[in-house]
Image (tube, rainbow, N blue to C red):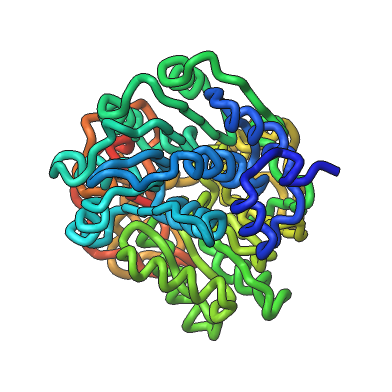
Amino acid sequence: MTTFADLGLSPNILKALEKTNFTAPTPIQVQAIPQVMEGRDLMGLAQTGTGKTAAFGLPLLHRLLDIGHPPGPRNVRALVLAPTRELVSQIHDNFMVFTKGTAVKLTMVVGGASIHKQSERLARGTDVLIATPGRLIDLLERGAVSLEKCGYLVLDEADHMLDMGFIHALRRIAKHIPVKRQTLLFSATMPKDIEEIADTYLRNPVRVQVAPPGKPVERIVQGVYYTPQGDKAKLLETYLKKHPGEQALVFGRTKHGSEKLMKLLVSWGFKASSIHGNKSQNQRERTLAEFRAGDLDVLVATDVAARGIDIPGVRHVYNYDMPNVPENYVHRIGRTARAGAEGNAIAFCAPAEMEELQAIEKVLKKPIPVVGGAPWAMDVVKAAVKPGQNRGRPQGAKPGGRPQGAKPQGAKPQGQRAEGGKPFGAKPQSAKPQGAGRSAGGLATPKKPQGARRPANRGAMAS
């Protein structure tokens, strides 16, 4: 069996690992660590939960330990970019473990936190800066940080970064980093656009892959339940009561719908909370801490959390709303079966979501087993209101259904903004509008329809 010592890591790092549950390197770590330690650019493909953070973090820190002197004011030696605050926080927590007992300085910057305090910390310089793209651009524009001496660039969850419209932010950031650097790109999927990014920013990279892109963890027991949209909340209640005391993660499509579903679950007696783009950074961190500590049984989230939660206690994932990006399904269900545990993932499919289900099964290259209901007939699917329609509902409308006597309104694209609050100049791609046309469990929707929104690929944190 290969050990971390066999990979040639620094004794200081090995000593820190002795006090963790990192007993043996995972396949992606075995393949990636030696290549990174040799200074090679690397493109790593591995599904979520396979240890990608350590695959780039351990060899990167090994190289930084050899420098022997602190960084200068506002200077950064290594930059790690990730698309969401939760993922940045998770990477930072892992790096804290890896660097315990060493002189390596770490700094984390995300939107939703005080930019003034972040500027003060960066003024002293840092060895490793872990950041979301939008907030980093804000700091660069203020002159609070310099990347002129940055010798390492890591792009984590690059496919998700692309989905969230960060390609333009990446181009702006890359202009501040020396061309002569080591670049590492990690992704769970490899669409054509990611290949183009790799060709642009990586030099003769070595490619490591431990599982086919999009393939979910084999230990996850998956299922799909065909149910009308208005019946989903009661179905979720039934599943949650089947597994009392076991932690569950519930994914919704919109911020508003997820918040209303959470409040409904609380009214039914569940210890539940929510996490989405309308929550402040402190609120999100506090909620994740409570969930991690076991104080919450149910966490309702949008895709903002699909790649930023690493909590071994999550036994069940419920796709309350089907994701409109099929690859996000893999990342959602990957929040369970962590660290060798087993997990279950159930998807609730309404008639209007058959197209999303078919796209997911195409990515998986196999059908998801049916655990309830039956696939919707084509005439039912065609008559169903697509997510995003009927955003407003007249008073007295039937809960969970189409407004009485009203024609469905055309959906407007849901806008997204960058972490720092400034939209990037990405042109909208042709995509289906986001947003849920019906509220959680048939609850009443706001009386006033929301105003026009910006195109979907403008920034990071809409969900």
User: Can residue 49 be seen from the camera position used here?
Assistant: yes
Query: x, y (%) of residue 437?
Result: 39, 52
Give me the residue at 30% from left, 65% from top: 280
Quadrant in which the N terminus appears: top right
Front-most of residues 127 and 156: 127
Task: Tell me: 134 left or right of 264.
Answer: left
Front-most of residues 383 and 451: 451
Q: Residue furthest right?
A: 1
Query: x, y (%) of residue 214?
Result: 64, 35
Task: Name which quarter of the figure residue 186 lies in.
Answer: top right
Give me the residue at 35% from left, 70% from top: 283
Task: Tell me: 442 left or right of 169.
Answer: right
Query: x, y (%) of residue 447?
Result: 24, 64
Task: Tell me: 144 left or right of 239.
Answer: left
Task: Name which quarter of the figure residue 281 lies in.
Answer: bottom left
Give me the residue at 54% from left, 26% from top: 39
Q: Residue furthest front?
A: 68
340 is higher (above) or lower (below) than 431: below
Q: Residue furthest left?
A: 142
Front-most of residues 181 and 172: 181
Task: Name which quarter of the figure residue 36 lies in.
Answer: top right
366 is higher (above) or lower (below) than 319: above
Front-most of residues 300 and 449: 300
User: Can residue 415 be seen from the camera position used here?
Assistant: no
Query: x, y (%) of residue 29?
Result: 68, 39
